[in-house]
Amino acid sequence: MTAGGTGTPGLRGPLTAVLVTGPSMAPTLRHGDALLVRCGGRAVRPGDIVVAVFRSRPDLLVVKRAVRPADGGWWVRGDNELVTDDSRVHGVADVRGRVVARYWPRPRRFSARRL
């Protein structure tokens, strides 16, 4: 699942709105969901939903689940096992922020989930 936008990805400010595109995080997140992302704050933990950039694809901002720390970054995966557009294909990702809430269309707070 990618976060909307093109060009060099980046998040501005302590809280940023991100629009989800694609099916890789279904059923947790769906195409069109609007998320609130926190840059900074507490450290990322396994199970957190994050916004990240793959080192092999620095132009692509993605929304994935953090699985484990790897090579100074994170191994990330989508919740939809049928879509493999994640670390299994692109390798280690650098986390830009942690998803704290979905505010559209169904408000929901997120916390770490054990894998």
Image: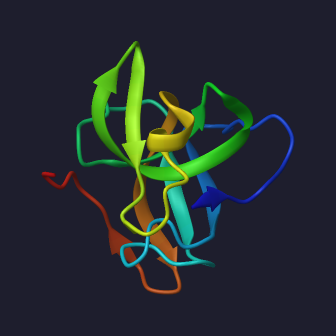
Q: In the drawing, does residue 80 fall left or right of residue 52?
A: left
The quarter of the picture where residue 104 lies is bottom right
Q: Is residue 55 above or below residue 114?
A: above
Q: Residue 76: give x, y in percent of width and height.
A: 40, 42
Q: Residue at x 63, y 78 (%)?
A: 32
The quarter of the picture where residue 98 lies is top left
Considering the image in quadrants, where does the N terminus appear?
bottom right
Q: Residue at x 50, y 47 (%)?
A: 86
Q: In the drawing, does residue 61 fall left or right of residue 98?
A: right
Q: Is residue 39 above or below residue 62?
A: above
Q: Residue at x 32, y 67 (%)?
A: 109
Q: Residue furthest right?
A: 7
Q: Residue at x 45, y 52 (%)?
A: 64
Q: Is residue 42 above or below residue 67?
A: above
Query: 83 or 5: which is nearer to us?
Result: 83
Q: Is residue 28 above or below residue 98?
A: below
Instruction: Tell me which colouring the rendered structure shows.
Output: rainbow
Q: Residue 57: give x, y in percent of width and height.
A: 70, 33
Counting labels gives 0
Q: Residue furthest left?
A: 114
Q: Residue furthest bottom?
A: 105
Q: Residue 43: give x, y in percent of width and height.
A: 30, 28
Q: Residue 35: give x, y in percent of width and height.
A: 53, 64
